[in-house]
Image (cartoon, helix red, strand yellow):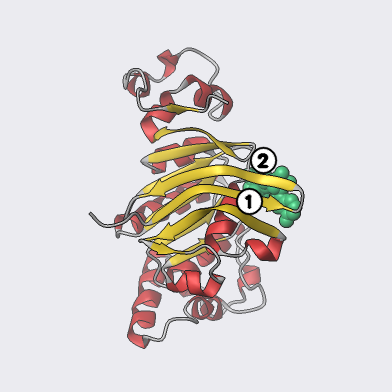
Amino acid sequence: MSPPALAVTGLTVDYGPVRALRDVSLLVPEGGFVAVLGGNGAGKSTLLRAISGVLPFHGGVVREGGITAAGTPLRGRRPDQIVRQGVVQIPEGRDVFARMTVAENLRAGALGVRDRAAVAAARERVLRLFPVLAERERQRAGLLSGGEQQMLAIGRALMAGPRLLLLDEPSLGLAPIMIGRIAETISAINGEGIAVLLIEQNAALALELASYAYVLEVGAVALEGSARELAASPEVRDRYLGITGGADDEPDLAATGPAKTLTRWSG
Ligand SMILES: Nc1ncnc2c1ncn2[C@@H]1O[C@H](COP(=O)(O)OP(=O)(O)OP(=O)(O)O)[C@@H](O)[C@H]1O
Ligand SMILES: [Mg+2]
């Protein structure tokens, strides 16, 4: 069996005196789609920063634990080395180069890639996925709408030829119709065999897209299970999906029965 696209084991992270993650373990199977849910300050972005190697730029330190991508250890590696392992993050707030054109932003995503044919193929693929970017290639990225900038951020990440895509709240601040488009695109990307780790406060969206999910609470994994199980669990329905009634409102999800493999945090 091939090693998982991502394996995080016992990860503990501090920002100075602040412990942001405690003993977090999670798996993303090769080509899998996994979501991490959690409220503000739960440690979601910290988890992604630790994986992509940018944690030191935020004043954070990995104290304990291991991170491997397709069997290769990532802990202690530089962000560019981690990108070369096929692990590419789309940070919170998208963060495109506003004064550069769309085309320049896309090229920047492929800076570490030497294979010119691969870069050209990646560009074709991105412009096919996001026709609006093709129309705006010469335009400055800062002039794009929020949703278009999110598309550009995803497109730029795809230019690096990732095996695993790390997304930090791609739906944040977008109109529902745009969220739908981004969601379809992420599913399509996953359908092409690229593994996805999706961080979301929008639990309904995350559980619809992912097949497995983890819930982070104050820096620790509080709950994990298949997306179906989590969507049916009273805690998730109450706290993250805002459904306070009984389980009758959504019989198809509730019909999955007692969530036997649902792992409860007993602390
Ligand atoms: N650069 C930093 N320096 C110090 N503390 C930080 C830093 N970044 C985050 N923290 C703290 O670490 C904890 C986790 O923050 P993190 O940004 O990972 O949460 P999050 O789940 O992404 O939240 P949100 O949903 O608001 O984006 C919080 O208590 C936060 O205050
Ligand atoms: Mg965050």
Tell me the quadrant of the picture where the C terminus can be found: top right
Instruction: Please name the residue shown 37% across and 22% down the image.
Output: 259
Q: Secondary structure at mark 2?
A: loop
Q: Residue furthest front?
A: 64
The residue tagged 1 is 13
Q: Whole-Å distance between the Cαs marked 1 and 2?
A: 17 Å
Instruction: Please name the residue shown 55% across and 55% down the image.
Output: 48
- In the displayed structure, would residue 112 be above or below residue 16? below
Instruction: Please name the residue shown 35% across and 22% down the image.
Output: 260
Instruction: Please name the residue shown 63% across and 37% down the image.
Output: 39
Q: Amino acid at mark 2?
A: Asn
The reply to whether residue 2 is in sight is yes
- In the displayed structure, would residue 256 be above or below residue 117? above
Classify mark 2 as within 8 Å of ligand 1 or not, answering yes or no.
yes
Drawn side of residue 255 relative to residue 235, left or right = left
Q: Where residue 224 appears, x then y in whole percent?
A: 45, 34
Q: Residues within 10 Å of mark 1 (few under 14, many from 20)?
A: many
The residue tagged 2 is 40
The reply to whether residue 132 is in sight is no
Q: Amino acid at mark 1?
A: Val
Drawn side of residue 98 relative to residue 188, left or right = right
